[in-house]
Image (tube, rainbow, N blue to C red):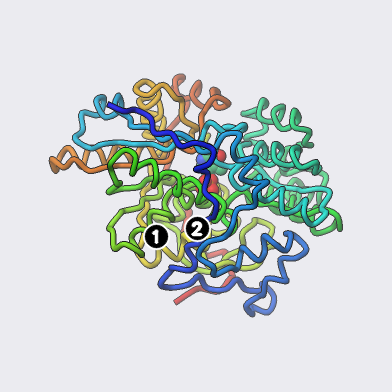
Amino acid sequence: MQRKFMLSDQDIPEKWYNIIADMPNKPLPPLHPGTLEPIGPEALAPLFPMELIKQEVSTEKWIEIPDEVRHLYSLWRPTPLYRAYNFERMLDTPAKIYYKYEGTSPSGSHKPNTAVPQAYYNKQEGIKKITTETGAGQWGSALSFACNHFGIECEVFMVKLSYEHKPYRKVMMNTWGATVHASPSTTTEIGKKILAEDPHTTGSLGIAISEAVERAATNDDTKYALGSVLNHVKLHQTVIGLEAIRQMEMAGDMPDVVIAPFGGGSNFSGLALPFLRLNFDEGRNIRCIASEPSSCPKLTRGQFRYDFGDTGGMTPLLPMYTLGHDFVPAPIHAGGLRYHGAGVIVSQLLRDKLIEARAHDNVEVFEAGVQFARAEGIIPAPEATHGIATVIAEAERCKREGRSEVILFNLCGHGNFDMKAYQDYFDGKIVRHEVTEAEIKASLARLQTPTIP
Ligand SMILES: *Cc1c(COP(=O)(O)O)cnc(C)c1O
């Protein structure tokens, strides 16, 4: 009875997998918000280094991982893949449950998989400083770690709610030398404007993005980095799934169902896209399910149309499932899942019914997270508990149907900095919350961006 499946340093993938090469319908182009004309990659040049822009629009199926990036990956990669025997027993299911554990990275989640190459390519192009936003603090931590390694300055706009809930995430970023502001802040024009309208706002990822973009756009030696949503971020995360395929082979199993939590789509893509490749190339029929909170349900209840990536409306228009760029979700603890939209690649895949999505209530996910911690020991990040809720639902289905399917999920981070969230759950302060149809309709009705027939 083997419990964990380990690879060694030499097994770190040499190439990232770019699913755009294999997609039956390629993503629609981003549009200029003024002219509504498709924009070319050069429009992104003020914000990102050229190499990342090339990756953003690449149609090459495999993209080489630089040696220096693989070398830093080897601090924590390859990550372990476990068979969750105890959890299976607790759920009394005939399903076999496996999980890929990304919480072994220095910052405790999958985020450094893209922070490291992003810092690397900025360094290659002589950039001195990178700005970014962070929701739960995971991305800010990951980028702080990566920037510190490559000797780049890092400035982080942290959603105010998380800044208050998770003070130690800020200290972690400071330890790696980064500067951190609670967002909205008074250091940017958009931050000042939003504070003037609503001084008590808890902030949102969309607002923090606007602040970080403004800072980068107004300083020459400064670029911006995004921890999710964009194509190159999803590309970098595919190391997760590429490793997992080899580990599942070691285990002598292949998943019937692959599950991951969903904020903007990076950890979901990281695990799922390499398995979707097996569907494309080998005719397999692996189901991939993205799990989101029912308080921010863009995949299950949003609209597929053009929208801004940020609240301030500074980004190009992107074709995606969205709840509207000024949608401010309830202040749930899964900060990384409070984003109004879904990445372009994943949106197109969902539109084409090549992937599925589920939404779970706030209380249900904490029940799932605590159950998992009591079975397997690892305390999941609040984001990861959404995937676990889907795993439980699938394991129960397997039981009802008497099927011993293989389920693989992404335990994309540990929750060791999220004790406030668990405390609130134990104190009965976490309440069921679902956005109403009227709220979603009202938010979408405010959009003046193009719809997609
Ligand atoms: C950031 C984060 C998420 C959500 O972002 P994705 O891009 O959808 O992966 C989920 N889980 C954890 C642990 C995170 O840090």
Q: Position of residue 374 (x, y in %)?
A: 37, 20
The reply to whether residue 329 is in sight is no
Side of 452 where 160 appears, left or right: right
Residue 230 placement: quadrant = bottom right
Name which residue type carries label 1: Arg
Q: Position of residue 400 (x, y in %)?
A: 15, 40
Q: Is mark 2 within 8 Å of ligand 1?
A: no
Secondary structure beneath label 2? strand
Q: Are marks 2 and 1 in contact (CB under 8 Å)?
A: yes
Q: Quadrant of the C terminus?
A: bottom left
Residue 33 placement: quadrant = bottom right
Query: Label 2: few (<14), some or many (≥20) within 10 Å?
Result: many
Disc 1: which residue:
277
In the rendered image of this protein, does residue 244 appear above or below residue 431? below
Q: Position of residue 129 (x, y in %)?
A: 81, 48
Side of 414 where 350 appears, left or right: left
Q: Residue furthest right?
A: 220
Residue at position x 60%, y 40% in the image = 73
Side of 211 where 169 appears, left or right: left
Disc 2: which residue:
17
Secondary structure beneath label 1? helix
